[in-house]
Image (tube, rainbow, N blue to C red):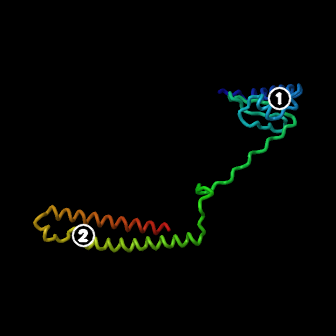
């Protein structure tokens, strides 16, 4: 849609105001704001033009409609919705008091610390079994190099797993 230049829009507004004044003088003075808006084909809420009894709104075609309602009072704003809770939880969602939450956090930290101690112990055991990548072969592995290579691969995987677990638990404890 091409918008007319500001000067032409001002002239159109004056013409609309004059037509609105004629319409209101011809008997539409008693018409309510809602009726006038409906007659003008408004699809949105009418807005009072500053310093006058003129109102404007948008029509279905996208054009602005102007109309005059001398003694109209601006409709009240719709009531505001109650604010939502910050996390988006429903109002019926149970709340936890600070003391209960602190005891839960303390318990969680203790569980994580216990898991960390256990994983560090398992990591130390894996490191001793790994023996820097050259553990002594078991008697059944001396004749079969493939079995020895498979055991070294399992030991390496166990070592890496325990190291990742220790790192993850330390990160989790650092967050709290």
Q: Please give the residue where the numbered disc 2 appears in the rendered image.
A: 130
SS class, disc 2 = helix
x 84%, y 37%: residue: 72
Q: Please give the residue where the numbered disc 1 appears in the rendered image.
A: 17
x 75%, y 29%: residue: 65
Is 101 situated above or below 93?
below
In percent of width and height, residue 169 lies at 41, 67
122 horizontally vs 145: left or right: right
In percent of width and height, residue 124 lies at 31, 73
Q: Label 2: how many residues lie within 10 Å, few (<14), some (14-19) or many (20+)?
A: many
Instruction: Name the foreground residue: 78 vs 18.
Output: 78
Quadrant of the image containing the N terminus: top right
Q: Residue 4: which quarter of the image?
A: top right
Is 170 situated above or below 21?
below
Q: Which of marks 2 and 1 is nearer the N terminus?
A: 1
Q: Residue 19: which quarter of the image?
A: top right
In percent of width and height, residue 94 lies at 59, 62
25 horizontally vs 46: left or right: right
- The furthest residue to the left: 143
């Amino acid at each position: 849609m091409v918008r007319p230049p500001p000067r032409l829009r001002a002239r159109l507004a004056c013409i609309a105001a004059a037509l609105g004044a004629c319409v209101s003088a011809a008997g539409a003075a008693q018409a309510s704001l809602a009726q006038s808006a409906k007659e003008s084909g408004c699809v949105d809420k009418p807005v009072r033009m500053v310093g006058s009894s003129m109102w404007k709104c948008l029509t279905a075609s996208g054009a602005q409609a102007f109309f005059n309602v001398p003694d109209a009072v601006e409709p009240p704003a719709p009531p505001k919705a109650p604010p939502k809770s910050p996390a988006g939880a429903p109002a019926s969602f149970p709340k936890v008091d600070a003391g209960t939450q602190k005891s839960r956090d303390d318990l969680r930290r203790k569980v994580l610390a216990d898991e960390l101690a256990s994983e560090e112990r398992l990591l130390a055991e894996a490191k001793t079994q790994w023996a820097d990548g050259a553990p002594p072969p078991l008697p059944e592995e001396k004749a079969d190099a493939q079995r020895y290579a498979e055991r070294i691969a399992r030991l390496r995987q166990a070592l890496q797993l325990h190291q990742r677990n220790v790192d993850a638990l330390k990160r989790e404890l650092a967050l709290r």
